[in-house]
Image (tube, grey):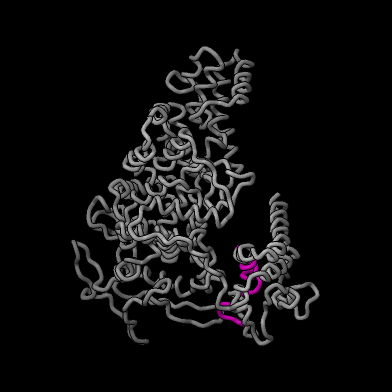
């Protein structure tokens, strides 16, 4: 099944390559060529070619890491001639009967991979911008540059609308009030609205009722709780129930929830977590981001990079990033070295992360066998000012290397503190990463997708918008609630999920509302609200199962799993959830007189809408045929609705 899907996907891409020949004639090749390159050609090169023609090794002086270097070529001249695969060595050398054949050893390229390279080179022929080494990715024409101090919601609307023109798509209509109230409750509080809350909003006749509701929700305790759930899963990941309990007992959840409720600036929260020196008992939980990694410094580095800089660096452990040239092997080991002196221990307010004043001078070896010192820097920053000891000098961890600050013993020179002050503070990546993550949470995908791969291999769909929002976020003092409200008030956020054209547009255009699967906590909580038993969301065993099965948060690609279906279908634990009792929704439905009344009420409490004609007819018929066992029929109806895609998805 998976194999068939992969083959079909490749056939589809090849078909798009054929279409690209027509596009080249019409002068529209750039977008086709660039999509093929970033989505398919670059990964093929990374898999088969860059070990010998990139990174440390450049056999025959040929570097295939960029289009510019491929055009420049090596000893034998250029490897790439735009529009002419038959004259391009990077195509002719991978053909089955080529001599010499590439790759020289190991598995040859598949027929589909070879065909993709041919189609891509053909697609380059209609765009002069791709022929010049210095002009590889022509910048999109900037139609409008937002002024400083502009209203962020208006900037979002204007620049997204410019994107619709660029993508040549028709946007959806604005969603109706029923759709909007469900969507905004789920996105800002992690729960569906109650029937009462939905009815109050629908009955409100004020023109600014959406803005009023957004303000109400952003300032609610439910908002802070939901942000804590999302960022716990995103920054720490899912884990066993006992570790979840430790996060609670050690103050992590309390710290994060209070910070979002108080609207603490994100740069301050970043400092709290990366320095791990809480200044009060209320902030003691901030140490847990580092503490939970249990002195595994590589694990810490691999969490810090995506969590606060928006980049994945794991593959740079052994070599420079094969797809994003700006991410070097030195960046990976530099970040490891910065945290290499940190150790779990006792803290001022409980557990803590201490720091040694000596040691931690790491070395790493590149693919070419060259060994070098790990710098104390990250992603192009200046090396932190720390003198390394001489070759034969043995450092002593003596008392005179430490000082006492606010009741804590810390090194006089702290790498963590220097990192936070010299590299993290004011770093534009911190603001860009957070803006992109919040956009992904609220809009269904980031302006850069995936949200934690903000590198040159994953360009922004709306670069001007991302740049402006990041700078605006900085100038606002890293005001999280202001950013959230600006996005949710935008026209782009409030679009209907039904396309405004016959085919569904590219999701990167944000021309229609994108589907967002509920995270585990939101899914269980919303079920409890629908069933009229909100206390059931606190069922520890059930919550553990939901976190295990529905653990993805801001996943690169959302997929349903057979384990999820089996649990919802067969688990006795979940079956109890929909059982009729006098207090819950199932019991109240049973008290209604007619099947029609039961169906209308069930749709309102679960979906927040009424059934259409077909749904009403078929569901009423289902209940009528089971009138002798109405209790079971109602339980089955609610089970089917709560486990449906409509309920599971925020749309």
Depth check: give the residue in front, 584 or 540: 584
Q: Position of residue 299 (x, y in %)?
A: 44, 63
Q: How many marks?
A: 0
Residue 55 is covered by the magenta coloring: yes
Depth check: give the residue in front, 448 or 389: 448
Q: Residue at x 63, y 25 (%)?
A: 614
| Horizontal arrangement in the rendering, residue 114 relative to residue 439 (left or right) | right
Residue 582 is covered by the magenta coloring: no
Q: Position of residue 393 (x, y in %)?
A: 33, 85
**Furthest-right residue in this view:** 97
Based on the displayed image, in which of its 4 quarters is residue 630 positioned?
A: top right
Q: Residue at x 34, y 82 (%)?
A: 388
Seen in the picture, residue 583 relative to 312 is either above or below; the reply is above
Seen in the picture, residue 146 relative to 247 is either above or below; the reply is below
| Horizontal arrangement in the rendering, residue 74 relative to residue 185 (left or right) | right
Q: Position of residue 406 (x, y in %)?
A: 18, 62
Based on the displayed image, in which of its 4 quarters is residue 421 positioned?
A: bottom left
Specify start and end residues of the magenta stretch as a single range: 39-59
Is residue 104 shown to the viewer in this render?
Answer: no
Depth check: give the residue in front, 385 or 309: 309
Seen in the picture, residue 325 relative to 530 is either above or below; the reply is below
Is residue 131 shown to the viewer in this render?
Answer: yes
């Amino acid at each position: 099944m998976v194999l068939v899907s992969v083959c079909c996907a490749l056939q589809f891409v090849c078909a798009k390559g054929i279409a690209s020949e027509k596009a080249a004639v019409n002068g529209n090749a750039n977008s086709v060529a660039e999509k093929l390159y970033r989505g398919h050609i670059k990964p093929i090169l990374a898999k088969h070619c860059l070990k010998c023609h990139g990174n440390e090794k450049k056999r025959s002086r040929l570097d295939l890491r960029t289009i510019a270097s491929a055009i420049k070529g090596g000893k034998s001249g250029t490897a790439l001639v735009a529009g002419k695969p038959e004259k391009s060595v990077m195509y002719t050398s991978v053909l089955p009967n080529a001599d010499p054949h590439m790759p020289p050893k190991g598995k040859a390229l598949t027929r589909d991979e070879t065909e993709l390279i041919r189609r891509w080179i053909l697609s380059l022929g209609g765009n002069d911008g791709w022929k010049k080494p210095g002009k590889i990715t022509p910048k999109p024409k900037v139609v409008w540059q937002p002024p400083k101090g502009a209203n962020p919601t208006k900037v979002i609307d204007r620049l997204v609308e410019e994107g619709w023109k660029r993508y040549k798509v028709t946007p959806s209509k604005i969603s109706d009030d029923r759709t909007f109230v469900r969507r905004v409750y789920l996105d800002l509080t992690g729960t569906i609205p109650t029937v009462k809350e939905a009815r109050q909003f629908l009955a409100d006749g004020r023109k600014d009722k959406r803005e009023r509701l957004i303000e109400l929700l952003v300032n609610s305790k439910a908002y802070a709780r939901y942000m804590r759930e999302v960022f716990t899963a995103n920054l720490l990941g899912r884990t066993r129930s006992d570790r979840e309990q430790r996060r609670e007992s050690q103050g992590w959840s309390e710290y994060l929830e209070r910070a979002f409720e108080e609207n603490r600036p994100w740069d301050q929260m970043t400092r709290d977590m990366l320095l791990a020196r809480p200044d009060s008992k209320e902030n003691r939980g901030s140490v847990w981001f580092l503490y939970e990694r249990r002195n595994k410094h590589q694990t810490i580095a691999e969490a810090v990079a995506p969590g606060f800089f928006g980049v994945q660096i794991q593959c740079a452990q052994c070599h420079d990033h094969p797809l994003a040239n700006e991410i070097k092997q030195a960046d990976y080991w530099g970040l490891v070295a910065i945290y290499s002196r940190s150790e779990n221990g006792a803290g001022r307010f409980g557990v803590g992360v201490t720091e040694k004043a000596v040691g931690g001078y790491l070395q790493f070896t590149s693919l070419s066998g060259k060994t070098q010192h790990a710098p104390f820097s990250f992603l192009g920053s200046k090396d932190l000012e720390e003198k390394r000891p001489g070759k034969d000098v043995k450092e002593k961890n003596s008392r005179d290397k430490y000082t006492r600050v606010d009741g804590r013993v810390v090194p006089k020179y702290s790498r963590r503190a220097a990192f936070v002050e010299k590299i993290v503070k004011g770093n534009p990546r911190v603001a860009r990463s957070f803006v992109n993550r919040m956009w992904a949470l609220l809009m269904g995908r980031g302006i850069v997708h995936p949200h934690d791969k903000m590198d040159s291999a994953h360009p922004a769909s709306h670069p001007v918008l991302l740049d402006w929002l990041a700078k605006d976020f900085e100038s606002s003092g890293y005001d999280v609630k202001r950013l959230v409200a600006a996005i949710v008030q935008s026209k782009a956020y409030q679009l209907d999920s039904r396309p405004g054209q016959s085919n569904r547009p590219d999701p990167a255009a944000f021309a229609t509302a994108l589907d967002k699967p509920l995270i585990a906590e939101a899914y269980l909580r919303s079920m409890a609200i629908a069933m009229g038993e909100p206390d059931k969301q606190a069922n520890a065993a059930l919550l553990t199962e939901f976190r295990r099965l529905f653990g993805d948060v801001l996943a690169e690609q959302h997929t349903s799993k057979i384990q999820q279906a089996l649990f919802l279908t067969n688990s006795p634990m979940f079956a109890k959830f929909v059982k009729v009792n006098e207090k819950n929704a199932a019991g109240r439905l049973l008290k209604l007189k007619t099947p029609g009344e039961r169906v209308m009420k069930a749709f309102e409490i679960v979906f927040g809408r009424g059934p259409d004609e077909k749904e009403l007819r078929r569901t009423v018929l289902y209940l009528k045929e089971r009138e002798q066992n109405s209790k079971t029929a109602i339980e089955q109806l609610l089970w089917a609705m709560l486990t449906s895609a409509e309920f599971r998805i925020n749309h």
